[in-house]
Image: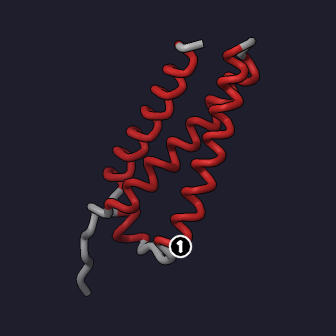
Amino acid sequence: MSVVFTPWNWTVFGFVILALLALSLFVLGILTAYFGSGKSRAVGVVLLVLGIVVGALVVLVTHYAMPSINLLNNVILGTIFYVVAAVIGAVLGLLIFLGAIMKT
């Protein structure tokens, strides 16, 4: 029995980045809308809506693009790959959040 090691699945990598971008925009939008005032509160609502839209698109596209994911090859063996994608997605979300707040 042989195990095929395929850690470089660029589709999954991209979807993990987009999913974490959506999650970070959602959470940071909630925090900004709740704790902000004036323009910051409006920016928080925009970030929240943007996070919801990106998240919904990721769910819809992954449902049709990747109907079956091999857990061993795509998740367990590619853990480091996905952690890198998670960090990139979270950093992108944080940078968008900071850029939006600094402009208000």
Residue at x-position 47% and y-position 36%: 90
Residue at x-position 39% and y-position 54%: 14
What amino acid is at disc 1?
Answer: Tyr
Q: Quadrant of the C terminus?
A: top right
Residue 34: image location, x then y, percent: 76, 22
- Left or right of residue 13: residue 93: right
**Protein image colouring:** secondary structure
Is 78 or 16 nearer to us in this picture? Answer: 16
User: In terms of image quadrants, where is residue 7?
Assistant: bottom left
Residue 39: image location, x then y, percent: 69, 15
- Left or right of residue 5: residue 73: right
Q: Quadrant of the N terminus?
A: bottom left
**Residue, disc 1:** 64
Q: Tally the numbered discs.
A: 1
Kind of element beneath mark 1:
helix
Instruction: Say few, some or many: other residues with alpha carbon within 10 Å of mark 1 (under 14 / 14 to 19 / 20 or more).
Output: few
Residue 88: image location, x then y, percent: 38, 39
- Left or right of residue 86: residue 47: right
